[in-house]
Image (cartoon, helix red, strand yellow):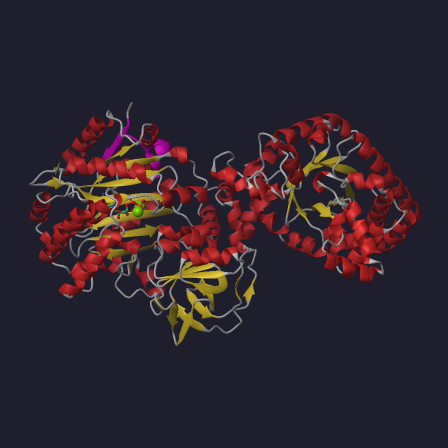
């Protein structure tokens, strides 16, 4: 098998299309090479080798070695250098890179091939001994860390001590002799700590590094990242071996990262940072404060040092044109890594850039206007779940701001919370339901979990491409970085700002859109849902087939959902109306009544309350469909439970506590979810159905008169398993309908349907459809009854199931296509066989989950219904499913 693909000198064996085997980095290096861009030559070991490595007890296959050696010879021919040569040595980088980008999650080794002999040759050849020794010490540091497992901090400490001893502030100040000295200390520390010498043989170094890249696929950071981003373990990572180019070769050399458009705002402007006389990850590590690539951004963001545009105009012009070429080629914003060696530009990476939702919207809309992509493509490029970010609040611009510090605006949105200084504290705060702002000098991949748990992130070091900035943007968490005016006193847990010192637990507000840090809590406002968002949503609405309704129980929910574009109510849970205000007392009166007459008396009091709510809903929805579900939960849910509650309620109801206790006990059920609920209540107590139906029809009359729009209520009978159950309840409803129509002298159109939430109902759908005029899939209960898993108890074992790989997703969040989905498919087909114009919808949690929405599109449902705040997500996901 062919396990190695080479690239270099304008030709590559692979291309962008091979990303599954070559990984994103390797595929795009090949593609750039084929485009004729300046890319240092190299080779890619395909990701299948990673799979082999883990299947065979962490061994690299023997046949790989000659293939890699052949690729290396090609690199030698192109560069005119030789690996391990003591005159003109070829140095390489060993870079990981899988199918999905995992920024900073796996390990890379630079300057490989250096040893005590080649370092001399390198210095001699370049005419710069300082550079050679700087490269050697970098190599030892990275190799010892990544391959030999000696923590980098050991070296940073030595370097810090030596710098102080030599009286230097920056790494770039050290001379060749000083670096040589540092190298000798490094080597002896390795021997001391590990009991083995730093390997001198370049081939040994090479295979050590390749093995370490494969091993890094399973390190804790990478495993966590994959879990957070749903990346399968089986993909594995590819390895790239590439000829080194040097950004640390003096002041005409540099290294940098850039975006073809601003990843935070979406503004069409080249955006990036670089460092002179530096290498690799110096820019993102935040060791020195980086400089702006363009002059415009330098001025706008207040970078102190000159831009690359000014310092290296020729390289800049070439770089700018490559950026434009790559963006047009990939038809998307690119995130680039490059190095300038003595004035010559080299491209080291390109990929589609991660961006904030706001930027994603603007970029998609701009690209449509530029004629680069179609409207449907624009719609497809927005991650529906990321719309959550847009619904985040921002700081009210009208209130005065007490600014205590400011830095770079790394990830937009605003958040308030208490200061914590460690990732662990952020996690604890989240668990305890407190809001935390994670304050760090800088962040590293170990902090990922804490960053996730925080409301916002603040770092005093680093630029727009620092770890904190990149990760926060990806997570949609507000973030401010590089607040040079603020200082963190870790030992005393203090944050020192302009004129104030704050301690752990003090409240601050972070404005990730301006870069400001404010004292205390600040009023926020909801975001504007027009502009780019509005245009994308309009395109989405045009492209989707399914309608999007909302689950709304109150007029307030309905109003919010309308503003988010809901096209009807898919589920109104009437019981939620009974918990409001004094109604619970009347409800209890009904439940505790001794006989039917007592129940009817209480129901008569409840009727006008329900009618009022329904009139409100119908009026707000103005002729749009409204599905109302009859009373569903078991009655004891409305009753008090503890002795104190019972005493209190008995007082209000004028009952003896003991009598109340008896009645509560009588209603007790062992398994209420499968007990006396749903249509079973309606059959036991038809007077409840009569009351609810009357409230619905009278409200329909009132709303129709008031709005002039015809109201067509859809009455949904819950938990039906037998057609005879539905027949019984439907007969009650029809009778009330006839009565109300006669009284009002008005014809009301209405539908009676059922929720499909029991496997029996799904299987008997063709029979039930003889009575039901619509089906709505209640996937919360259907999942529960299909799996036989109580959704209220599943939290005890679902996480274990996921961790042990028994299931991939929580079926209560993302629909189980194979099982529950099969029942939905069966019910849809059988239902439509009986009644071909049958309206079908979904109203469980899954109605707002993009993957589940795709499934609904595939099986031809008419609508999805979800909570109000998920309506925009569902509109977009429904469009993507239809495109
Ligand atoms: P990551 O996936 O963490 O970004 P990379 O493999 O892209 O890791 O390497 C990180 C950085 O190392 C690059 O951005 C680049 O600056 C530097 N680098 C990698 N390979 C080379 C090379 N062949 N020559 C010069 N610098 C390199
Ligand atoms: Mg890295
Ligand atoms: Mg990179």
The residue lying toward the viewer, choosing from 737 and 294, is 737
Residue 315 visible to the viewer: yes
Q: Is residue 269 visible?
A: no
Q: Residue most toward the top?
A: 1
Q: Which residues are magenta?
A: 3-25
To which quarter of the image does residue 208 belong? Answer: top left
Tell which of 649 and 525 is nearer to you: 649
- The x, y position of residue 278, in whole percent, is 21, 54
**679 and 789: which one is in front?**
789
- Side of 811 relative to 734 (left or right): left
> In the rendered view of the protein, which quadrant contains the C terminus?
top right
Q: Position of residue 513 (x, y in %)?
A: 45, 61
Horizontal side, residue 181 vs residue 403: left or right: left
Image quarter for residue 293? Answer: bottom left
Looking at this rendering, what residue extends furthest in the bottom direction? 499
Judge left or right: residue 77 versus residue 708.
Answer: left
Report the number of discs.
0
Q: Nearer the viewer, residue 695 or 654?
A: 654
The percent coordinates of residue 164 (x first, y second) are: 18, 64
Q: Determine whether 302 is above or below 851 in the image.
A: below
Residue 541 placement, left or right of 499: right
**Does the magenta segment cover residue 838?**
no
Quadrant containing the N terminus is: top left
Residue 710, position as x, y percentages in the image: 79, 47
Is residue 17 one of those drawn in magenta?
A: yes
Q: Residue at x 38, y 74 (%)?
A: 498
């Amino acid at each position: 098998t062919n396990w190695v693909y080479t690239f270099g000198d304008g030709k590559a064996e692979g291309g962008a299309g091979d990303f599954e085997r070559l990984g994103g980095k390797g595929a795009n290096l090949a593609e750039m090479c084929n485009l004729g861009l300046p890319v240092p030559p190299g080779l890619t070991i395909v990701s299948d080798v990673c799979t082999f490595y883990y299947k065979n007890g962490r061994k690299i296959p023997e046949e790989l070695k000659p293939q890699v050696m052949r690729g290396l010879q090609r690199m030698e021919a192109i560069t005119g250098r030789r690996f391990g040569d003591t005159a003109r040595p070829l140095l390489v980088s060993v870079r990981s890179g899988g199918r999905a980008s995992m920024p900073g999650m796996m390990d890379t080794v630079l300057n490989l091939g250096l040893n005590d002999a080649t370092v001399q040759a390198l210095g001699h050849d370049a005419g710069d001994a300082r550079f050679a020794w700087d490269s050697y010490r970098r190599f030892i540091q990275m190799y010892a860390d990544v391959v030999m497992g000696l923590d980098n901090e050991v070296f940073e400490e030595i370097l810090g001590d030596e710098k102080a001893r030599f009286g230097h502030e920056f790494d770039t100040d050290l001379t060749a002799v000083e670096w040589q000295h540092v190298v000798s200390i490094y080597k002896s520390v390795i021997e001391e700590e590990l009991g083995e010498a730093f390997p001198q043989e370049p081939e040994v170094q090479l295979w050590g590094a390749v093995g370490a890249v494969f091993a890094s696929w399973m390190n804790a950071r990478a495993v966590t990242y994959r879990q957070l981003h749903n990346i399968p373990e089986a993909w594995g990572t590819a390895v790239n071996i590439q000829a080194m180019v040097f950004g640390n070769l003096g002041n005409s050399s540099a290294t940098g990262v850039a975006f073809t458009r601003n990843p935070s705002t979406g503004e069409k402007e080249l955006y990036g940072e670089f460092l002179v006389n530096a290498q690799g990850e110096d820019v993102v590590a935040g060791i020195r404060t980086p400089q702006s690539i363009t002059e415009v951004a330098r001025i706008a963001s207040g970078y102190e040092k000159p831009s690359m545009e000014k310092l290296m105009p020729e390289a800049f012009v070439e770089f700018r044109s490559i950026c434009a070429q790559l963006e047009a080629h990939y038809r998307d914003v690119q995130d680039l890594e490059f190095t300038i060696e003595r004035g010559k530009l080299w491209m080291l990476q390109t990929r589609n850039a991660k961006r904030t939702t706001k930027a994603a919207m603007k970029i998609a809309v701009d690209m449509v206007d530029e004629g680069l992509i179609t409207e449907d493509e624009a719609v497809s490029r927005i991650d529906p779940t990321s719309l959550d970010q847009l619904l985040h609040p921002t700081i009210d611009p009208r209130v005065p701001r007490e600014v205590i510090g400011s830095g770079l605006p790394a990830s937009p949105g605003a958040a308030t919370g208490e200061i914590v200084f460690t990732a662990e504290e952020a996690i604890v705060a989240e668990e305890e339901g407190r809001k935390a702002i994670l304050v760090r000098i800088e962040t590293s991949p170990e902090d990922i979990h804490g960053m996730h748990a925080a409301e916002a992130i603040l770092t005093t070091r680093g630029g727009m491409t620092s770890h904190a900035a990149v990760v926060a943007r990806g997570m949609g968490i507000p973030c401010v970085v590089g607040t040079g005016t603020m200082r963190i006193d870790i030992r005393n847990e203090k944050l020192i700002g302009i004129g104030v010192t704050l301690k752990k637990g003090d409240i601050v507000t972070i404005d990730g859109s301006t870069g400001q840090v404010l004292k205390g809590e600040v009023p926020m406002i909801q975001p504007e849902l027009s502009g780019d968002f509005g245009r994308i949503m309009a395109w989405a609405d045009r492209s989707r087939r399914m309608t999007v309704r909302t689950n709304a129980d109150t007029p307030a929910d309905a109003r919010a959902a309308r503003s988010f574009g809901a096209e009807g109510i898919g589920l109104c849970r009437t019981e939620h109306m009974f918990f409001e205000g004094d109604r619970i007392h009347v409800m209890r009166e009904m439940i505790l009544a001794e006989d039917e007459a007592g129940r009817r008396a209480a129901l008569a009091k409840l009727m006008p309350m329900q009618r009022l709510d329904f009139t409100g809903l119908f009026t707000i929805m103005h002729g749009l469909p409204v599905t109302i579900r009859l009373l569903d939960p078991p009655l004891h849910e409305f009753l008090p439970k503890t002795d104190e509650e019972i005493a209190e309620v008995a007082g209000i109801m004028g009952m003896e506590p003991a009598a109340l206790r008896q009645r509560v006990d009588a209603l007790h059920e062992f398994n209420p979810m499968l007990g006396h609920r749903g249509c079973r209540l309606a059959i036991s107590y038809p007077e409840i159905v009569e009351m609810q139906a009357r409230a619905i029809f009278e409200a329909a009359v009132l709303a129709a008169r008031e709005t002039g729009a015809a109201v067509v209520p859809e009455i949904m009978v819950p938990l039906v398993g037998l057609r005879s159950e539905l027949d019984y309840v439907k007969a009650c409803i029809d009778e009330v309908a006839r009565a109300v129509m006669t009284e009002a002298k008005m014809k009301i159109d209405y539908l009676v349907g059922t929720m499909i939430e029991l496997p029996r109902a799904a299987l008997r759908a063709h029979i039930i459809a003889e009575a039901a005029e619509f089906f709505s899939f209640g996937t919360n209960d259907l999942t529960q009854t299909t799996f036989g898993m109580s959704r209220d108890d599943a939290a005890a074992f679902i996480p274990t199931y996921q961790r042990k790989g028994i299931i991939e997703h929580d079926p209560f969040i993302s629909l189980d296509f194979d099982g529950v989905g099969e029942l939905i498919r069966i019910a849809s087909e059988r239902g439509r066989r009986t009644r071909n114009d049958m309206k079908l919808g979904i109203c469980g949690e899954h109605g707002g989950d993009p993957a589940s929405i795709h499934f609904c599109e595939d099986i031809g449902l008419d609508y999805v219904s979800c909570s109000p705040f998920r309506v925009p997500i569902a509109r977009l996901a429904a469009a993507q499913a239809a495109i």
